[in-house]
C-alpha cells in the first residue's frame, strides 16, 4: 500500500500542460467514474467531459479494454478518484501522466478528513463522495486547478453554483435524517462503502465485504454479518447496484434461522450512477435516492 501512495504522488508530479487542441474543438476531460464525470461536467460546462466507467460498473474491479484505452489516450486531461478506488488502473494512470495531466481527487481531501479502516494509516477509504460536504470541499480544490489548466472551458459562476448545490444537498441530508432514532441507525451494506456517510450523518456500519469488492467474501464474512446484525440490532440490510444480491440473501436467511428478522432495505447506488433513465442519473439524485431509501427502510 505504501508503494501505491508513492505511485500516485508521481502521477501528480508528472503532470504536463494539456496538449493544444484543433481550433474550435472543446478540450476533452476523461474521468474514471461516472460519479466524477457528472461533477466535473458541472464544474467545467464548456469542456467535453466523458466517463470511462458507465452506470453499474464497479471501479474496484474495472480493467480498461481497448476502447477505454483509446478514450484515455485522446483525453486532454484525465481525472480520477485515487485512494486505490481504480485499483487495476494505477500503472496505466502513472504511464499516461508522462504525456498529459492526470488529476486525482485524493490530493484535495483536507488533512485529517481521510478515514482509515481498521486504523491502518497506509490504507485510506476511497468512498469520499458519500459525505456531500467533504466531496464539495475536495471538488472545490480540484476545480481551482482544472480551471487553470482548462481556462477556455471553465465558467467560475457555474462551478460556484454547483458547489452551492452540494452544500444544500449536505444540509438536506442532515435535515432528512434528523428524526431517525439512534438505535435504528445501523447501515448494513454489501461492501464497506459508507464510512464517510456514517461519520457525516451519524450511522453505525456493518458490511459483508471490506472497502474494496476485489476481495472475495466467504462464509466467515456472512457469519460475522449475521452476528453483527443481531448484536447491533440492525433493522435492514441493503443491496448495492451492480453487485450480487447473494450475500444479502445469505445474511437474511442466517438471521431468520436464529429467530432474528432482518429485512431487505432496498438497493443503494454506491460506486456508480444508475444511468440516464434511473433515479440516480446524477450524483445529487443518487445521494437523495439513497437517503430516502435508507430512511424508508430504517424509520
Ligand atoms: Zn466501493
Image (tube, grey):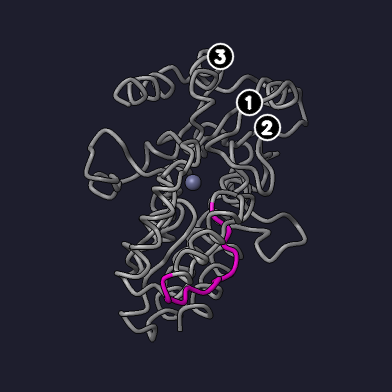
Mark 1, residue position: 76
The image shows residue 224 at horizontal and vertical percentages of 36, 55
Pick whichever of labels 2 and 3 is earlier in the sequence.
2
Name the element at disc 3. loop
Tell me, yes or no, if residue 237 can be seen here.
yes
Mark 2, residue position: 28
Name the element at disc 2. strand
Residue drawn at x 51%, y 26% is: 102
The answer to whether the residue bearing label 1 lies less than 8 angstroms from the nearest atom of ligand 1 is: no
Residue drawn at x 34%, y 75% is: 233
Q: Quadrant of residue 270?
A: bottom right
Q: Is residue 131 left or right of residue 118?
A: right
For residue 289, above or below residue 111: below
Residue 3 on the magenta segment: no
The CA span between labels 1 and 3 is 10 Å
Pick whichever of labels 2 and 1 is earlier in the sequence.
2
Name the element at disc 1. loop
The image shows residue 211 at horizontal and vertical percentages of 41, 45
Q: Quadrant of residue 186?
A: bottom left
Residue 259 on the magenta segment: yes
The CA span between labels 2 and 1 is 5 Å
The answer to whether the residue bearing label 3 lies less than 8 angstroms from the nearest atom of ligand 1 is: no
The image shows residue 65 at horizontal and vertical percentages of 70, 24
Please tell me the numbered disc located at residue 99: 3
Pick whichever of labels 1 and 3 is earlier in the sequence.
1
Q: Quadrant of residue 64?
A: top right
The CA span between labels 2 and 3 is 15 Å
Which stretch appears magenta?
258-270
Q: Are marks 1 and 3 in contact (CB under 8 Å)?
A: no
Residue count near mark 1 (Cα–Cα under 10 Å), binned few <14, some 14–19, many ≥20: many
The image shows residue 117 at horizontal and vertical percentages of 29, 46
Amino acid at each position: 500500500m505504501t508503494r501505491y501512495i508513492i505511485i500516485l504522488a508521481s502521477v501528480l508530479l508528472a503532470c504536463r500542460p494539456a496538449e493544444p487542441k484543433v481550433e474550435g474543438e472543446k478540450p476533452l476531460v476523461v474521468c474514471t467514474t461516472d460519479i466524477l464525470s457528472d461533477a466535473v461536467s458541472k464544474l467545467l460546462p464548456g469542456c467535453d467531459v466523458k466517463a470511462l466507467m458507465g452506470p453499474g460498473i464497479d471501479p474496484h474491479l474495472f480493467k480498461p479494454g481497448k476502447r477505454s484505452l483509446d478514450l484515455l489516450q485522446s483525453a486532454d486531461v484525465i481525472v480520477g478518484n485515487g485512494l486505490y478506488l481504480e485499483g487495476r488502473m494505477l500503472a496505466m494512470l502513472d504511464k499516461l501522466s508522462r504525456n498529459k495531466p492526470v488529476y486525482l481527487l485524493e490530493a484535495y481531501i483536507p488533512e485529517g478528513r481521510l478515514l482509515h479502516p481498521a486504523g491502518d494509516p497506509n490504507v485510506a477509504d476511497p468512498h469520499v463522495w458519500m459525505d456531500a460536504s467533504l466531496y464539495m470541499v475536495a471538488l472545490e480544490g480540484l476545480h481551482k486547478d482544472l480551471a487553470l489548466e482548462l481556462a477556455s472551458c471553465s465558467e467560475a459562476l457555474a462551478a460556484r453554483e454547483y458547489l452551492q448545490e452540494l452544500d444544500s444537498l449536505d444540509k438536506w441530508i442532515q435535515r432528512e435524517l434528523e428524526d431517525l432514532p439512534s438505535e435504528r441507525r445501523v447501515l448494513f451494506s454489501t461492501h464497506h462503502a459508507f464510512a464517510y456517510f456514517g461519520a457525516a450523518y451519524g450511522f453505525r456500519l456493518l458490511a459483508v465485504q471490506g472497502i474494496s469488492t476485489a476481495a472475495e467474501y466467504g462464509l466467515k464474512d456472512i457469519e460475522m454479518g449475521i452476528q453483527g446484525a443481531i448484536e447491533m440490532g440492525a433493522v435492514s440490510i441493503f443491496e448495492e447496484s451492480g453487485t450480487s444480491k447473494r450475500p444479502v440473501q445469505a445474511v437474511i436467511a442466517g438471521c431468520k434461522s436464529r429467530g432474528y428478522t432482518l429485512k431487505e432495505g432496498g438497493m443503494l447506488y454506491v460506486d456508480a450512477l444508475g444511468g440516464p433513465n434511473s433515479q440516480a442519473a446524477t450524483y445529487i439524485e443518487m445521494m437523495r435516492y439513497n437517503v430516502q431509501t435508507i430512511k424508508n427502510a430504517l424509520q
